[in-house]
Image (spheres, coloured by chain):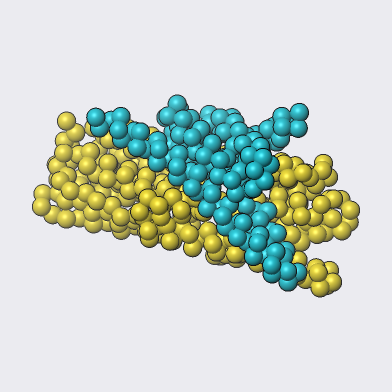
């Protein structure tokens, strides 16, 4: 039940970001589904492994693959689906807690949180890169041979 | 086939068309490799062009092509990156149409100028839905209904303020700084008067609209695909936007914990 509610919230949140970034009107609900599925992946995997970084990585792989598939399906660039989907994964919370720790002069927590934030950002890009380059090399093999 | 470049003027126009296409894509947040690829495809789609190459960075585009043993080069400076995915899609479609048809370059430029003027959503809709996104994000982080409402109102105010400030053409750094400090100040105010419940969640939710997610991902994507200058440049943008937000939040929190509010 709780997962269904989270799915709904993530769906609506992604749609909001999609409109903020001027997504084409026909793609709104598709990008919402991609974002919601990625958030659910993030939620399940990060609570299973107890690591936000691993969760973010798999979530961005999901967004990347869904983005490429939807892009193929609707003949639009994959960025249209990927950008709204990854914005909820961006470590805004990590940035905030790092700053909070710095303000309280708790430098140990600040380093901890800061490193985690950096690795979450790297995990997002890594996940997207894996799906994008996979799809590009599949395309190359398909059309050249 | 497509053989309608007959004089020097046409070749110039083709070059202009290709650079304008690139400019619109880059301005609205497309990746470097996609922009370079589109420019080269447009230039090479006409028979008389023997050589065409593009070098794209997030702050400028260089294109050159060869027409009847003469090299022509065009340079475009790009400022103010603002994400508009609809335009990327439209320009992508346009470039595909241009390559596969016999359209003349000046016709293409007219079409491109029309595309550049299209507004998909009004800025009111964007602000309303953007703050809704932030509000639902605070619920995802475990906020209550009151947190949801205050995040909605606060991000509405922050987004409207940022749109207003944008007209003064200050740097993105100041914009983000002001946005983040406004967001944390209002969150503090709302929890102090007892409207919102969790200050942390409200702040995190309302800075979400400012966070440079696109810049971070595009930076690392560019670097890994070998566009090192683009990667560095976008990386700098991401790092400094994040720093501005952190400074904004830190500035307000620091004053608060010193007991000055």
> Which residue occupies the extreme front position in the image?
A49
Q: Position of residue A2 (x, y in %)?
A: 76, 32
Quarter of the figure with residue B71: bottom left
> Which residue occupies the extreme top position in the image?
A73
Which color is chain B depicted in?
Answer: yellow
Which color is chain A depicted in?
Answer: cyan
Q: Where is residue B62 in the image (x, y as percent from the top left)?
A: 30, 57
Q: Where is residue B131 in the image (x, y as percent from the top left)?
A: 69, 45
Q: Is residue A137 left or right of residue A144?
A: right
Q: Quadrant location of the C terminus of chain B?
A: bottom right
Does residue B27 lie above or below B42 as drawn? below
Residue occupying image coordinates x 31% and y 39%? B108
Residue occupying image coordinates x 65% and y 51%? B208
Q: Which of A131 and B214 is in front in this view?
A: A131
Q: Position of residue A129 (x, y in %)?
A: 45, 45
Residue occupying image coordinates x 56% and y 55%? A119
Quarter of the figure with residue A115: bottom right
């Amino acid at each position: 039940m709780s997962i269904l509610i989270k799915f709904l919230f993530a769906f609506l949140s992604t749609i909001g970001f999609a409109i903020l970034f001027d997504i084409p009107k026909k793609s709104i609900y598709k990008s919402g589904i991609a974002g919601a599925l990625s958030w659910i992946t993030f939620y399940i995997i990060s609570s299973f492994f107890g690591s936000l970084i691993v969760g973010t990585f798999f979530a961005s792989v999901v967004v990347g693959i869904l983005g490429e598939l939807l892009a193929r399906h609707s003949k639009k660039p994959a960025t249209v689906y990927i950008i709204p989907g990854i914005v909820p994964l961006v470590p805004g919370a990590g940035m905030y807690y790092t700053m909070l720790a710095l303000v309280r002069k708790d430098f140990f927590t600040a380093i901890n949180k800061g490193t985690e934030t950096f690795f979450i950002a790297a995990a997002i890009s890594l996940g997207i890169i894996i799906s994008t380059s996979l799809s590009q090399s599949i395309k190359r093999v398909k059309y050249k041979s | 086939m497509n053989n309608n470049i007959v004089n020097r003027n046409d070749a110039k126009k083709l070059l202009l068309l290709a650079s304008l296409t690139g400019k619109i894509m880059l301005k609205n947040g497309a990746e470097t490799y996609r922009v370079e690829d589109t420019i080269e495809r447009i230039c090479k789609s006409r028979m008389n062009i023997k050589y065409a190459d593009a070098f794209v960075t997030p702050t400028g585009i260089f294109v050159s092509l060869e027409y009847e043993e003469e090299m022509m080069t065009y340079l475009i400076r790009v400022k103010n990156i603002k994400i508009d995915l609809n335009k990327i899609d439209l320009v992508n479609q346009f470039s595909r149409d241009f390559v596969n048809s016999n359209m003349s370059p000046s016709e293409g430029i007219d079409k491109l100028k029309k595309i550049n003027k299209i507004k998909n959503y009004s800025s009111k809709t964007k602000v309303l839905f953007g703050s809704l996104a932030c509000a639902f994000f605070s619920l995802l982080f475990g906020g209550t209904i009151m947190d949801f409402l205050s995040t909605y109102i606060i991000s509405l105010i922050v987004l409207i303020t940022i749109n207003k400030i944008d007209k003064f053409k200050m740097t993105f750094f100041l914009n983000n700084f002001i946005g983040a400090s406004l967001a944390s100040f209002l969150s503090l105010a709302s929890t102090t008067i007892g409207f919102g419940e969790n200050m942390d969640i409200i702040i995190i939710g309302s800075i979400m609209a400012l966070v440079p997610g696109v810049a971070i991902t595009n930076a690392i994507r560019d670097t890994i695909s070998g566009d090192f200058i683009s990667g560095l440049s976008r990386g700098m943008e991401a790092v400094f936007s994040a720093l501005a937000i952190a400074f904004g939040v830190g500035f307000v929190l620091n004053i608060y914990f010193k007991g000055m509010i």
